[in-house]
């Protein structure tokens, strides 16, 4: 049974505002059509309800409430088949045409409403990992100036679990109206190979908006972990493979991929401890509940600088400015442990291009914001060059990364569930 939407919820507010936009649109059409009599007047609201309902499954309770009006619509069809009043029929046809135009507008881009007026309501960016983690940090940093530019609040929503695939699945199925966006990272390209039952196709179920940043990873451990450099860590982990614990953010997370590279270097499977994001994993690492992990510098720089964790190496070819004393994995004799965690912003596939363009523009501006540039630098990263903040560059990278990771994952035989 369908329950009525919570009147105070964000989705209900969105439904309301969307309905208002449709009503505004309807008024324009009615104005163009001219006067109508009582019969067809009942027909247009029915089309409107159909339009509204087709995009709002939770609103199907209207079906029962408005049945009497729908019966009025049946009467309208009966009138059409009776050659009684020619003028009446013409007016009816005019209204039906207007209704069809409205339905077409409603279906346009799958989102409905007036795309050129976007945004008229708050926007939600789903982060598919826990609050306080690296993906969350990147999202909140860019959301602030984007919100200012777009003139609407941006709500960051954490939908964590299954290596980021739950949150991504939610957005794939969300209203394609520009009010539901997804910030995801490299995991978008690894999920298809890792999850046989993946509920979405990264290339078909989303529109890319633009790339954001590529963040280096660091290998870190709790302060009591015995080894003191990467060479010692590999040796120690090899000798104690049955008891050391390696934290990650689930199968397909960047921390998981980096962990696989470490396992390859060690030549053994390790005890992995999955979290819903590396925010909570790092808290446990500092607390000594897990031994070591890989994580983006956006999470680890403050902990490394604060001497809360031991840092072994950074996973980029070059050292990074934020941690100039930390050697690279290559310098430490492990050139194969290299990962850069790229992030991109997505919308559901049917989102109108006009709306995507507005978000791309806001993202590009946000990435030039001096505060964002400084915060990124402090956390070991920088915005992507401007020509990468486009749907085209984003799609190109996504496709390349799917091609890159799929055979690697298939060969490793790793699967998520
Ligand atoms: N750093 C995480 C990862 O391993 C994700 C997160 O919590 O942002 O993919």
Image (cartoon, rainbow, N blue to C red):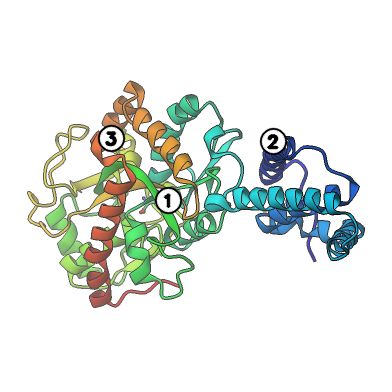
Mark 1 vs mark 2, CA separation in Å:
58 Å
Q: Quick one: label 2, few (<14), some, or many (20+) residues within 10 Å?
A: few
Look at the numbered disc 3 and give the secondary structure of its residue: loop
**Residue position marked by numbered label 1 in the rendering:** 284
**Residue position marked by numbered label 3 in the rendering:** 383
In this view, the residue in front, 136 or 12, is 12
Tell me, for residue 28, which label it has, or none: 2
Residue 291 appears anywhere in the view = no
Tell me, for residue 148, which label it has, or none: none
- Seen in the picture, residue 203 relative to 385 is either above or below; the reply is below
Spot occupied by residue 154 in the image (x, y as percentages of width and height): 53, 35
- Seen in the picture, residue 127 relative to 275 is either above or below; the reply is above
The extreme top residue here reads 370
Spot occupied by residue 77 in the image (x, y as percentages of width and height): 83, 63
Q: Earlier in the sequence, mark 1 or mark 3?
A: 1
Look at the numbered disc 2 and give the secondary structure of its residue: helix
The residue depicted at 31 percent of the width and 39 percent of the height is: 389
Q: Quick one: label 3, few (<14), some, or many (20+) residues within 10 Å?
A: many
Q: Nearer the viewer, mark 1 or mark 2?
A: 2
In this view, the residue in front, 33 or 191, is 33
Q: Which quadrant of the figure contains the C terminus? A: bottom left
Side of 150 where 142 appears, left or right: left
């Amino acid at each position: 049974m369908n329950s009525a939407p919570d009147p105070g919820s964000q989705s209900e507010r969105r439904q309301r505002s969307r309905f208002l936009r449709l009503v505004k649109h309807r008024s324009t059409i009615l104005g163009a059509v001219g006067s109508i009599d009582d019969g067809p007047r009942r027909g247009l609201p029915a089309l409107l309800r159909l339009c509204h309902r087709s995009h709002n499954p939770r609103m199907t309770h209207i079906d029962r409430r408005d049945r009497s009006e729908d019966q009025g619509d049946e009467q309208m069809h009966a009138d059409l088949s009776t050659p009684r009043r020619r003028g009446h029929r013409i007016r009816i046809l005019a209204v039906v045409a207007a209704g069809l135009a409205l339905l077409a507008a409603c279906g346009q881009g799958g989102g409905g409403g007036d795309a050129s007026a976007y945004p008229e309501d708050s926007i939600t960016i789903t982060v598919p990992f826990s609050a306080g983690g690296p993906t969350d940090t990147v999202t909140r940093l860019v959301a602030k100036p984007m919100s200012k530019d777009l003139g609407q609040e941006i709500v960051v929503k954490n939908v964590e679990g299954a290596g980021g695939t739950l949150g991504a699945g939610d957005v794939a199925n969300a209203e394609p109206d520009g009010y539901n966006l997804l910030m995801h990272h490299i995991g978008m390209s690894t999920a298809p190979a890792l999850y046989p039952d993946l509920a979405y196709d990264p290339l078909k179920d989303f529109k890319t908006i633009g790339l954001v940043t590529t963040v280096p990873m660091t290998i870190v451990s709790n302060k009591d972990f015995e080894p003191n450099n990467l060479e010692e860590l590999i040796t120690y982990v090899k000798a104690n493979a049955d008891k050391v614990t390696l934290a990650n953010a689930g199968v397909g997370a960047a921390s998981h991929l980096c962990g696989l590279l470490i396992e390859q270097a060690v030549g053994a499977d390790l005890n992995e401890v999955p979290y819903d994001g590396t925010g909570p994993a790092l808290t446990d690492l500092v607390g000594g509940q897990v031994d070591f992990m890989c994580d983006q510098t956006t999470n680890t720089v403050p902990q490394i600088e604060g001497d809360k964790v031991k840092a072994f190496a950074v996973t980029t070819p070059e050292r990074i400015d934020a941690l100039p004393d930390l050697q690279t994995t290559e310098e430490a004799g492990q050139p194969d442990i290299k990962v850069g965690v790229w992030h991109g912003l997505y919308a559901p596939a049917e989102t109108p291009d006009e709306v995507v363009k507005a978000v791309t523009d806001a993202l590009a501006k946000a990435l030039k914001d001096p505060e964002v540039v400084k915060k990124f630098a402090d956390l070991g990263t920088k915005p992507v060059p401007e020509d990468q903040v486009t749907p085209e560059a984003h799609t190109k990278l996504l496709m390349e990364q799917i091609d890159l990771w799929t055979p690697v994952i298939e060969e490793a035989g790793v699967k998520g569930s």
